[in-house]
Amino acid sequence: MDYFTTTSKTSNRATDCLIIGIYDGGKLSAGARDVDSASKGAIRRLLKSGDLSAKKGRTAVLTSVAGVKAKRIVVVGLGKSRDFGAKEFRDAVAAATLAISTTKAKQVLNSLTLEKIAGTSAYYLARHSAEAIGDTLYSFDQMKSGRKPKRSELTKAGFVIRARGDAADTMRGAQHGGAIVIGKSLAKDLGNLPANVCTPGYLARTAKKLAVGNGRLTVRVLNEAEMKRLRMDSLLSVTAGTVEPAKLIVMQYKGAGREQPIVLVGKGVTFDAGGISLKPGLGMDEMKYDMCGAASVIGTMAAVAEMKLPINLTVVVPAVENLPSGTATKPGDIVKSMSGQTIEVLNTDAEGRLILCDALTYSRRFKPAAIIDVATLTGACVVALGAHRTAVMSNDTPLQTELVAHGEKAADRAWPMPLGEEYAEQLKSNFADMANIGGPGGGAVTAGCFLGKFTDGLTWAHLDIAGTAWKSGAKKGATGRPVPLLSELLLARSGELP
């Protein structure tokens, strides 16, 4: 997608499609007021006749409006003006984009960027626009045979700005938003692929492809023999039941000399049947999404590489399958982690933490400024927060606060959750240093406490995305979260935010 800005009057700019809005009570957006004036009251007449609606998300496409140079005008309902915030702005742009996608428009001009929205700026309005457009146009049909649905012809998006002084920030926001869309779309693709395609080996090949032609990015993939030599027996215990080889994927992006890197660790269980602690059959197909942590950190790396950020970023992905067989790990087995700590595996379906603990220990060698693991770790997190917010746990309050704040800015919301010795007590084992589950209460937190046992001396945070990584039902599919949150963190840490 290409982007541009204009300070021209909304009605004076020639474009394939123009976006304007209407609030409840008939209040017109700034762009709509200009169009209404240029068309001698056409918008208000249509509103009065009932042909246009201010209901949130409702759209109408107008063509050949007298006095307006745009070929088409998409009018989108904005709801109540007092409630129109960043989320509502994104939703409005998404609704308008959906309407535009049914036309032959190749270019769109968004005048909603003229609206004054608390807590935003020219940069964020453009970035939110670019992300909303990209998210709306995303489709996953690569596994379907025969004639595929026609894709939108939209290739160029413009933003109406109040003053030329906003042009640089607007363009930066749009370009950053476009890069985040690239990363988010990659994360969605990886999540949506079936597990017989997106194997640990496929994830490794995808990571290697990202490095082709990029002098800042290198990728190394460790095989099971190399992991065995490193004594990553906790990780390898998860893959014992499958013939699909495990991989440890290490991606290193160097954009800031000798600075300590941020390290992102993504859980990459490409299919999770639960192992011997077998999951129920209903809904098991969705366990292809158990690698969405891996998908999101690989997607974040793609976004960072696209933006060419001046930062050092390392991504570590332990990639495995968790299947039952005669060779699979059994409940009650005890394994030794790379850290030397022993773990009693009481439930083989609590496998994510078993691969993450070794990946966290491995990541110490990079001497990270901060390390953040991302995982679809617990159903308990879904019970606690639903599908709306990612859980954030950390041994460093400033990092936890920073992540939650960046989630708000990025419209990829998160919520802080505690860690504490009272929860860690639930992980005690009679036979090993710890158990891999901690009883029925506080499951999301005890999982975080388990990982915390491998992060002494590190500035660490854990993101549980079990509720936010994918949607079920009629709109089933990966969401690409938390690529926007992580990208916002890295933009801030690299000093690239205006």
Image: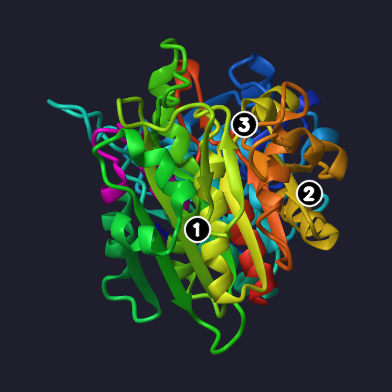
Which sits in the foreground, 346 or 54?
346
Q: Are marks 2 and 3 in contact (CB under 8 Å)?
A: no
Q: Is residue 435 above or below residue 396?
A: above
* Mark number, residue 90: none
State how far apart marks 2 and 1 are (Cα). 27 Å
Quarter of the picture holding the N terminus:
bottom left
Res. 104 visible in picture: yes
- Amino acid type, label 3: Thr
Magenta segment boundaries in residue numbering: 183-202
Query: What amino acid does circle 1 point to?
Result: Thr
The type of residue carrying mark 2 is Ile
Of labels 3 and 1, the one closer to you: 3
- Give the residue number, with chain letter if any, for mark 1: 300
Tell me what residue is drawn at x 57 percent, y 77 percent. Answer: 311
Estimate how packed mark 1 is, as few (under 14), some (14 to 19) or many (20 or more) residues with alpha carbons within 10 Å.
many
Q: Residue at x 29, y 41 (%)?
A: 198
Residue 196 covered by magenta stretch: yes
Q: Local crowd at mark 2 within 10 Å, few (<14), some, or many (≥20)?
A: some
Q: CA distance from mark 2 to mark 3?
A: 36 Å
- Choose mark 2 or mark 1, whichever is in front: 1
The relative height of residue 357 versus residue 254 in the rendered view (above or below) is: above
**Is the residue marked by circle 3 packed among few (<14), some (14-19), or many (20+) residues within 10 Å?**
many
Q: Is residue 356 magenta?
A: no
Looking at the image, residue 323 lies above or below residue 489: above
Q: According to the image, label 2 marks what residue?
A: 117
Judging by the rendered image, the residue that carries numbered circle 3 is 378
In the image, farthest residue toward the bottom: 257
Can residue 158 be seen? no
Closer to the camera, 212 or 237? Answer: 237
Alpha-carbon span between mark 3 and mark 1: 22 Å
- Label 2 sits on a secondary structure element that is loop
